[in-house]
């Protein structure tokens, strides 16, 4: 397959997304090691919000996610 820059390569993706050319990340994970970390944080924070909306209190969330109550409060206040 020919990439947008004109080089021939096999589009095998990475551990985050199976195809480079269809990847939703704004920067390649290999260009910036923060790509995976940010993706994991977004996923974790979204999961925290779902549990919070389901009625879990700060103490339960902190224990379940291994975070402090202050960190949980910061996440749900955004």
Image: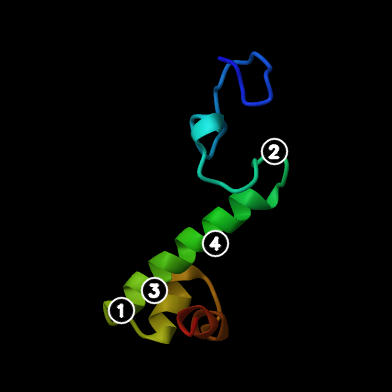
Left-right relation of 18 to 52: right
Q: Are marks 2 and 4 in contact (CB under 8 Å)?
A: no
Instruction: Tell me how far mark 3 sits from mark 1, CA to CA.
Output: 6 Å
Location of residue 48 by image quarter? bottom left
User: CA–CA distance between discs 3 and 4?
Assistant: 12 Å
Mark 3 vs 4, N-terminal side: 4
Q: Which residue is mark 4?
A: 41
Residue 45, position as x, y percentages in the image: 47, 68
Residue 7 as seen in the image, left or right of residue 21:
right
CB-based contact (under 8 Å), mark 3 and mark 1? yes
Mark 1–mark 2 Cα distance, whole angstroms, equals 35 Å
- Give the residue number, with chain letter if any, for mark 3: 49
Identify the residue shown where x is 65% and y is 46%: 27
Quadrant of the drawing holding the N terminus: top right
- Check disc 3 and report its element: helix, strand or loop: helix
Cα distance, mark 3 to mark 2? 29 Å
Disc 3 residue crowd, few under 14, some 14–19, many 20+, Cα 10 Å: some
Q: Position of residue 71 (x, y in %)?
A: 56, 80
Q: CA distance from mark 2 to mark 4?
A: 18 Å
């Amino acid at each position: 397959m020919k990439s947008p820059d004109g080089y021939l390569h096999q589009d095998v993706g990475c551990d985050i997304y199976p195809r480079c050319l269809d990847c939703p990340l704004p920067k390649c994970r290999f260009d910036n090691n923060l790509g995976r970390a940010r993706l994991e944080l977004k996923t974790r924070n979204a999961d925290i919000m779902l549990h919070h909306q389901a009625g879990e209190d700060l103490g339960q969330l902190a224990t379940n996610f291994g975070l402090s109550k202050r960190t949980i409060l910061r996440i749900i206040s955004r």
